[in-house]
Image (cartoon, rainbow, N blue to C red):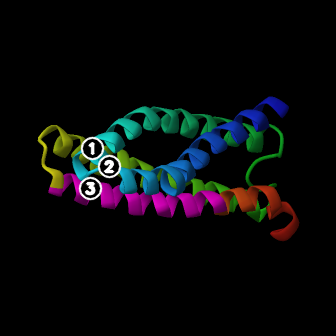
C-alpha cells in the first residue's frame, strides 16, 4: 500500500505540478520575452518533452488508484465519496489531456512546422485554456485527496 500511495502521489505531482509551472511561471515569461514564432516553437518543444511524462503519470495514477481501491480498501462500494470524486475528476482531466494531445497539440506542431503563426497562436490559446481547466481540476483533486476523507464522508 505504501509503495502504491507513493507512486500515486508522485505521478499527481508530476502532472499537476508540471501544468502549474507551465501555466503560472513559464507562460508569463515566454510572453514577455519571446516573439510569437519563438514562443510557439518553445511551447511545441516544451509540450513535446512534458506530454510523455503526462502519459506515464496517467498510467501510474490509474494503475495505483485502482490497485489501492480494489486491493486495500475493499472495492468502490466500500470507499468514501471523496475517492469517487477523485476518480471522476481524474477521468475528466484525462479526457481533456487526450483532446489537447491528439487534436490541439498535433495542430500546433503542424502550424509551427509550416510557420503558420496565426494558426499556431490559435492552437496555443486553445491548449492554454484547456490546461488552465486541468490545473483547476488538478488542484481540486489534490484538495479532495488531502482533505476529502475528513470533509466528504
Q: Residue at x 78, y 38 (%)?
A: 5
Nearer-the-camera pick, 39 or 73: 39
Q: Is residue 50 visible?
A: yes
Quarter of the N terminus within the rendering: top right
Image height check: is 110 above or below 149? Answer: above
Which residue is at the far right? 150
Taking the magenta stretch, the answer to whether it contains residue 134 is yes
Q: Which mark is residue 123?
A: 3
Majority secondary structure of the magenta segment?
Answer: helix
Secondary structure at numbered mark 3? helix
Q: Are marks 1 and 2 in contact (CB under 8 Å)?
A: yes
Q: Is residue 1 visible?
A: no
Q: Is residue 48 left or right of residue 116?
A: right
Provide residue 50's location: percent of width, then percent of height: 46, 37
Provide residue 99's location: percent of width, then percent of height: 36, 52
Q: Are marks 3 and 1 in contact (CB under 8 Å)?
A: no
User: Few, some or many C-alpha atoms within 10 Å of disc 1 (few <14, some 14-19, many ≥20)?
Assistant: some
* Distance between mark 3 and mark 1 Cα atoms: 15 Å
Residue at the spot of label 2 = 34
* Distance between mark 1 and mark 2 Cα atoms: 6 Å
Provide residue 149's location: percent of width, then percent of height: 84, 61
The mark that comes first in sequence, 2 or 3, is 2
User: Few, some or many C-alpha atoms within 10 Å of disc 2 (few <14, some 14-19, many ≥20)?
Assistant: few
Q: Nearer the viewer, mark 2 or mark 3?
A: 2
Nearer-the-camera pick, 103 or 45: 45
Residue at the spot of label 1 = 38
* Residue 143 lies in quadrant: bottom right
User: Few, some or many C-alpha atoms within 10 Å of disc 3 (few <14, some 14-19, many ≥20)?
Assistant: many
The mark that comes first in sequence, 3 or 1, is 1
Provide residue 71's location: percent of width, then percent of height: 79, 37
Image height check: is 96 above or below 59? Answer: below
Magenta residues, as a range?
118-139
Amino acid at each position: 500500500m505504501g509503495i502504491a500511495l507513493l507512486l500515486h502521489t508522485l505521478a499527481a505531482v508530476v502532472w499537476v505540478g508540471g501544468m502549474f509551472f507551465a501555466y503560472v511561471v513559464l507562460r508569463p515569461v515566454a510572453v514577455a520575452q519571446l516573439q510569437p514564432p519563438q514562443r510557439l516553437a518553445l511551447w511545441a518543444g516544451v509540450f513535446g518533452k512534458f506530454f510523455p511524462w503526462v502519459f506515464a503519470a496517467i498510467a501510474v495514477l490509474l494503475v495505483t488508484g485502482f490497485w489501492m481501491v480494489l486491493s486495500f480498501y475493499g472495492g468502490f462500494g466500500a470507499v468514501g465519496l471523496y475517492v469517487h470524486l477523485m476518480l471522476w475528476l481524474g477521468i475528466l482531466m484525462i479526457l481533456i489531456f487526450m483532446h489537447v494531445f491528439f487534436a490541439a497539440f498535433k495542430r500546433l506542431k503542424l502550424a509551427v512546422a509550416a510557420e503558420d503563426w496565426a494558426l499556431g497562436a490559435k492552437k496555443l490559446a486553445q491548449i492554454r485554456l484547456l490546461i488552465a481547466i486541468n490545473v483547476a481540476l488538478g488542484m481540486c483533486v489534490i484538495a479532495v485527496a488531502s482533505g476529502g476523507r475528513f470533509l466528504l464522508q
